[in-house]
Image: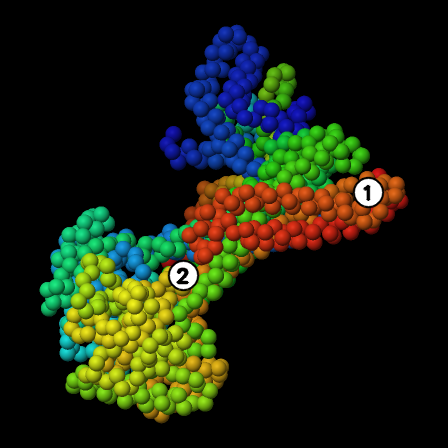
Amino acid sequence: MDRAKLDLVRGTLDVLILKALVWGPLHGYAITGFIRAESDEALLVEEGTLYPALWRLESKKLVEAEWGLSENNRKAKFYRLTPAGRRHLQRETATWEAYAAAVAKVLGATQPSPRRKPA
Amino acid sequence: MSSAPRRPRAVRRLFGPDHAADVRDELEFHLAAKVDDLVARGWTPDEARREAERQLGDRRSLQRIGEHIGGTMNRRQRLGDYWRECLQDLHFAGRAFARERGFALVAVLVLALAIGANVATFSVINTLILRPLPFPDAGQLAWIAPPPSGCGLSCATYSSDAYEEFRDQSRVYQGVTGYFAFSGPDNVRLDRGGDMVPATGLDVISNFFEVLGVTPAMGRAFTADDARTGARPVALLSHAYWVRQFAADRSIVGTDVMLNGHPTTVIGVLPASFDFGSVFLPGARVDLFTPLDLDAARDWGNIVTLVGRLRPGATLDQARDDASRIAPNLYFNVKYPQTRGQYRNGLVPVPLETHVSGEWHRPLVVLWSAVGLILLIACVNLSNLLLVRGAARSKEVAMRQALGATRARLVRQALTESLALSLTGAAFGLAAAFGLVRWLAHHGDLDLPLLNGVTIDTAAVLWTVLVAMVAAALFGLVPALKMTGDNVQEALKDSGPAAGRGQRHERLRLGLVIAEIALASVLLVGAGLLLRSFINVLDVNLGFTPEQAATMAVDYDDAAPSAEAGARKRVAAFERILDRVDAIPGIDSAGITDYLPFGANRSWGTLVPKGKVYRPGEVSPPLVYVVTPGFFRATGIGLKGRDFTWDDRFGGQPVIVINASAARFYWPDENAVGKFLSNGRADLQVIGVADDVREERVEDGSGWQVYYPATQESPSGARLVIRSRLPVDTLGSTVLHALRELNPTQPAVALTPLHTLVSHAVSPRRFFMILVAAMAGLGLFLAALGIHGVISYSVARQSRDIGVRMALGASVGRVRRDVLMATLRVTLWGIGVGIVVSLVVARLIASLLFDTSPWDVTTYIAMAAIFLAVALVSGYLPARKASRVDPMIALRSN
């Protein structure tokens, strides 16, 4: 993968992580599971990218972390959306949807009529 | 998930700082969770573990990234917390001060005064001592003069020949220059379309500005050609004069103006940054500069001062060696071979800076110490106020401590409050200092160098901040520690001030007040000694009587082909002027002289009685005055023998009057009147002996003085001196009117009381005395405040005891007496300590005193008396309050 693609993935990853936390605190492993399951196994998030992304979100105060106990009674770090994180997610979601709609519209275009050629 | 705790901050406090462990634990959990999943899907635990680690990838670099991000986050967090807490503290302080407005007001006022005084003093010291002189590479500039002696400036000058030979023979200078040392104020007449305006001009050697490194703001500097005899007259204007007289008209450069009746070309205007007076002649202003014609001045004697600019790398030691090598070869006048060697040991280069401001080092350091003491007193005072406040707030503090605030946190909160107070005070102090410094810079007649350059600059502002912070630490730390160090339980008990703690507090507070009184005593003693010196200086017998005498510069014309014709013309003019002025009703006597005391002066070489031989250096050249008949009476100089008369004609027997010191030296046991002195060319008959007149400084004794009659010698300028009981304001216009009738070119100069010469000469002493006295007054006020505070507080604390005593029959007088005795005890302790410290410290200002011992008993007694009186007044108010305690109320409360 080249750099530009990586950046795109990382930016997208942030939104996906935030989305994963909308319904309540999750630990890192649960976040990977959520993304994998919700994308029907299409998106596999590597640990080497997930955790740095999580920590960065934490340092930007979009999420905050708490230590708690997992389902198996293990000590785990839970992440939770902050109000700022929730706002960020809403903004990014809107942007993403507009982007996706625009791309879809272009890709679904039929042959343009001659009059609409640029002058 | 519901098990996730809801106290993020507390949890973060517990685990937060260890980021390495956090990251490790998190990744470990991830692996474990994944292994669980894989095992559930049928993997063997070992394979599952390996697969999980493979998926995780490079664990070590992940660990590093996590630690890095965590560290950054933590630092940001801590900083954020710190500022939030600071803001919280400030907010809290603001609320507290709003509640205790009286306290805050007093504290800020005290600090503003103390810090303002410190900043203003710093600005003056910065300009006079710390900052270099306002010339490029000022460190290279040297003032070349003989070692200090009694005759001041006139002995610090050199003849044209000596200057030229020194310039040519010295090897360490890039350039040597000088200026004519003996011009007085208003010595030039500027003709503005028939309107005669007086101005102050100064002759400088043509390379003067080049050597100093001053480039004209407009036009050009002098060249050697400008100074040649017969060259077209040219002048350079000072910036201030150009603005004042010529309305900053740029077109003036290159045009001619009429100076003393000669068309003179204005060749340039000097930069605003160059103020000759502030550097070389404090308190004087110079309006315009003209090139000095060294050839014409060759026979005038010692007339120029020397200033040199050392070559880069040349040291002052080299310059001294160089000067002592050249000095024995110098001629006073090359025409007279016997004048070779007159300047032996007479040329010593010192840094120009030392010459300009060296003598102010000590007074300024004393002043600095005084303001430092004031700051200390203010801090002690505030410490005390804060202790009282702390006692009142002890419950609140104990409550916060009980709720988990650490001592460090509480101390920080207290110090933030102190700093807030201090910085607010500093802001007001800075504003006050700004006003004071502006006033000083424009207070032109003060005899202090470089004052016009005093400003509040960046350094002064930084100094303010530093002083404010040091002050905050000084006055805030002890109360803060004291307040938070108390036993929590004891303070929380609802039983009023706990006895033991109260006493400990009280002892500390008493100690602080005693320190305050001691410091203020030292200041008071210092101010007293300076005041006594000042009174002694004013009491000095000056040798003349400045009261009821006034002076004015007079214009006259004695240009003539021969000296004799000139003398005739001059005498006729002077006689007419004096006749006319004498006839003005109310004028008792009038005379003319060329130089007045405490101004410029000059000497013409040595005089010796005929036939007597002295060792070299034994006879010093007297200061020379050329005067008319009536001068002695008008100036009030006592005279034995006779005054000059108009009959002491040019060409007749040359006559002189010498002063008592000279007469005593030449003829110790005989009457000098009638004897003869020789100047090498003629024998001069002494017709009178005049009182010694203080010449350079009021404080110093007189050197030798000689008076020549204006009928026989040519004066360099003329100053009319009149004696009259009429006020100067009304007399001035009458005299000027009379002079103008005789001579239409007489400029409109003011008649100034002779006394201004004296007050100018003593102005620095008065200045310092007033400043130190102001400091002492402030110190006294602060100490009184401190006494009042500590006594009031102890009365308030003991009101129950007092109530009990009064209920048991103690009289009002008895209660009052006890309170006053307590006040007196504290004060006496303070004064005692203060006297001991003063006895040691006073020696340091001994050199600033005049006719006053540093251990002057009167001063010390007066100080003690003043302090006791002030203490009694400040103790009386609490005493009265104590005696009005109602036993019933006092007993019921609490």
Q: Residue under circle 1?
A: B802
* Up-down relation of residue B392 to residue A115 (above or below): above
Using the rendered view, name the quadrant where residue B762 is placed: bottom left
> In percent of the image, x 15 and y 73: which residue is there?
B681
Q: Nearer the viewer, residue B194 or B431?
A: B194
Q: SS at mark 1?
A: helix
* Up-down relation of residue B776 to residue B401 (above or below): below
Tag 2: amino acid: Glu
Residue, far front: B669
In which quadrant of the rendered image does the N terminus of chain B lie? top right
Q: Position of residue B882 (x, y in %)?
A: 79, 47
Q: Position of residue B118 (x, y in %)?
A: 50, 52
Marks 1 and 2, the one that precedes in the sequence? 2
Q: Residue under circle 2?
A: B699
Q: Nearer the viewer, residue B285 or A61?
A: B285
Tag 1: amino acid: Ile
Residue, far bottom: B741
Q: CA distance from mark 1 to mark 2?
A: 58 Å
> In percent of the image, x 50 and y 26: which residue is there?
A51
> In percent of the image, x 26 and y 65: which residue is there?
B666
Q: Position of residue B256 (x, y in %)?
A: 24, 81
Using the rendered view, name the quadrant where residue B761 is placed: bottom left
> Colour mode?
rainbow
